[in-house]
């Protein structure tokens, strides 16, 4: 029984030993399936998508993420104003370069995909990025989530209380009657 649970525990998690190229390839294959592309168009899409992602990664390598400096309570940031300003300007430059790459590849994708397919591709890419930012594992009842709020159960109709009529309203008129 414990062997089965250990196997199930790792399901759904990506392989930690995957290379970035393997992850990009898997993502491209999922998109080919979701976009219902034929074999010829699928191959062209995979090649273009891999080049697109590699170009994005090259831009990001040029601008390393600034290190987070943990600060104690009441302590100010250890970075100087000049360092902070440089980080902000680097972020602007990186955003411009990424936008240029996205626009260039939009024109490439447009040669063999229609606008709906491109929009769907961008949506799938955005969903993948959201998943990267999610916490791992389910929230536990009664324990605070990332925002410090208590877990309230699953959202939706099945988490609502059953209707209970208000007390002491037996003598009150309804629908404007007196």
Image (cartoon, grey):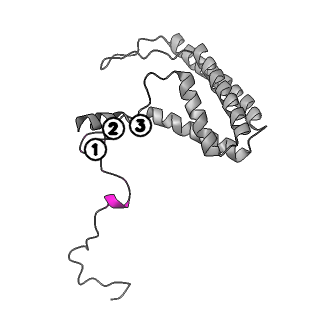
Question: Start and end of the magenta stretch?
Answer: 139-160
The residues tagged by marks 2 and 1 sit, at their Cα atoms, a distance apart of 28 Å
Which sits earlier in the primary sequence, circle 2 or circle 1? 2
In the image, residue 101 above or below residue 128: above
> Residue at 70% of width from left, 29% of height from top?
48
> Residue at 57% of width from left, 14% of height from top?
86
The residues tagged by marks 3 and 2 sit, at their Cα atoms, a distance apart of 8 Å
**Around disc 2, counting alpha carbons within 10 Å, would you say few (fewer than 14), some (14 to 19), or many (20 or more)?**
few
Q: Please state the total of marks drawn on the protein image.
A: 3
Q: Closest to the observer: 80 or 108?
A: 108
Q: Where is residue 69 shown, x and y percent of the image?
A: 40, 15
Residue 5, by quadrant, is top left
Q: Are marks 1 and 3 in contact (CB under 8 Å)?
A: no
171 displayed left or right of 59: left
> Residue at 54% of width from left, 22% of height from top?
20
Circle 3 SS class: loop
In the image, residue 53 above or below residue 155: above
Quadrant holding the N terminus: top left
Q: Where is residue 131 shown, x and y percent of the image?
A: 47, 36
Q: Where is mark 1, residue-wise?
A: 150
Q: Where is mark 2, residue-wise?
A: 8
Point out which mark residue 12 bears: 3
Which sits earlier in the primary sequence, circle 1 or circle 3? 3
Magenta-drawn stretch contains 98: no
In the image, residue 52 above or below residue 172: above
Of marks 1 and 3, the one in the foreground: 3
Of marks 2 and 1, the one in the foreground: 2
**Around disc 1, counting alpha carbons within 10 Å, would you say few (fewer than 14), some (14 to 19), or many (20 or more)?**
some
Name the residue furthest left. 168
The residues tagged by marks 1 and 3 sit, at their Cα atoms, a distance apart of 26 Å
């Amino acid at each position: 029984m414990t062997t089965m649970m250990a196997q199930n525990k790792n399901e759904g998690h990506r392989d930690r030993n995957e290379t970035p190229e393997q992850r990009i390839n898997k993502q491209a294959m999922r998109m080919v399936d979701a976009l219902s592309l034929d074999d010829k168009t699928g191959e062209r899409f995979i090649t273009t998508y891999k080049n697109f992602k590699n170009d994005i990664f090259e831009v990001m390598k040029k601008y390393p993420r600034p290190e987070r400096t943990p600060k104690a309570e009441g302590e100010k940031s250890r970075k100087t104003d000049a360092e902070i300003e440089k980080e902000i300007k680097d972020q602007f430059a990186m955003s411009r370069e990424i936008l240029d790459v996205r626009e260039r590849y939009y024109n490439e994708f447009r040669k063999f995909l229609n606008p709906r397919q491109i929009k769907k591709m961008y949506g799938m890419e955005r969903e993948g990025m959201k998943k990267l930012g999610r916490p791992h594992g389910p929230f536990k009842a009664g324990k605070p989530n990332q925002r410090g709020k208590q877990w309230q159960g699953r959202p939706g109709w099945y988490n609502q209380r059953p209707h209970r009529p208000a007390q002491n309203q037996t003598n009150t008129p309804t629908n404007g009657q007196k």
